[in-house]
Amino acid sequence: MNELSPRRRHAALAATAAAAALAGGAAVWLLRRFDPNAANSPLPGCVFYQLTGLYCPGCGMTRAAHALVHGDFAQMLAMNPLLPLLMLALPLLVLHAYGYRLPKAAIAALTSARLWIGLLLGFWVLRNLPWPPFAWLAPG
C-alpha cells in the first residue's frame, strides 16, 4: 500500500474531520429536535430487540446520545455505557488509520480484535442477565 505524503495525509484528515463535523452536527440537530423516548419518534428502535426481546450491545445508543446532547450524563450512562468509550476510541482509530503516531499501548488495545469482540460479547451477555448488578446494564 502506498503511503500518503504528509500534505495529502493532512488534507485527507481535514476532509474526514469536516465530514465528521457535518454528520455530527446533523446528528445533534436531530437528537435535539426529536426525542427517541417518545412514542411517535421518527428515530427507529432496535430491530434486534423488537424481534428477540434481548438487548444487543447497541441498544439504547440513540437514547444515550439524546441524553448526551441534552447534558444528562447519568442518563447517558444508564442507557448505554459503551457510548463514552466509543466516543474516545473512534477519533484515535481514525488518526491511527491516517498514519499518525499514537502511544503503542493505546493502539495495541484499540486495534485488538480479541479485545473488542470480548468486550462486545461480554457486554451483550451481561446486560441480558436479569439480576443485579447485571440488570443495571440494560437500557433505562
Image: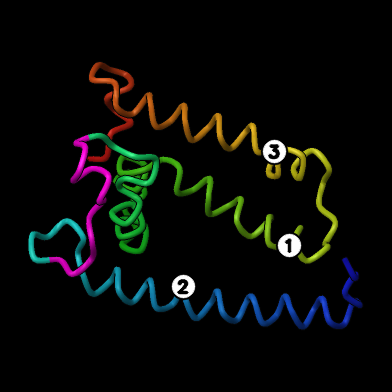
Residue at image position (37%, 24%) is 126
The residue wearing badge 1 is 95
- Classify residue 107 by image quadrant: top right
Residue at image position (34%, 48%) is 76
CB-based contact (under 8 Å), mark 2 and mark 3: no
What's the amino acid at mark 1? Leu
Q: Where in the figure is residue 98, as x and y percent of width and height?
A: 78, 66
Real-space CA distance between mark 2 and mark 1, rounded to the nearest whole angstrom:
17 Å
Compared to residue 13, the image places residue 113 above or below, namely above
The residue wearing badge 3 is 112
Q: Considering the image in quadrants, where does the N terminus appear?
A: bottom right
What secondary structure is marked by label 2?
helix
Residue at image position (66%, 82%) is 15
What's the amino acid at mark 2? Gly
- Range shown magenta: 41-53
Disc nearer the start of the sequence (1/3): 1
Q: Where in the figure is residue 92, as x and y percent of width and height?
A: 68, 56
Q: Relative to the observer, which residue lies in front, 51 or 96?
A: 51
CB-based contact (under 8 Å), mark 1 and mark 3: no
What's the amino acid at mark 3? Ser
The residue wearing badge 2 is 24
Seen as rendered, the residue at the extreme top is 131
What secondary structure is marked by label 1?
helix
Q: How is the image coloured?
A: rainbow
Q: Considering the image in quadrants, where does the C terminus appear?
A: top left
- Classify residue 36 by image quadrant: bottom left
Q: Which mark is residue 78?
A: none
What secondary structure is marked by label 3?
loop
Q: How many tags in the picture?
A: 3
Q: Relative to the observer, which residue lies in front, 113 or 60?
A: 113
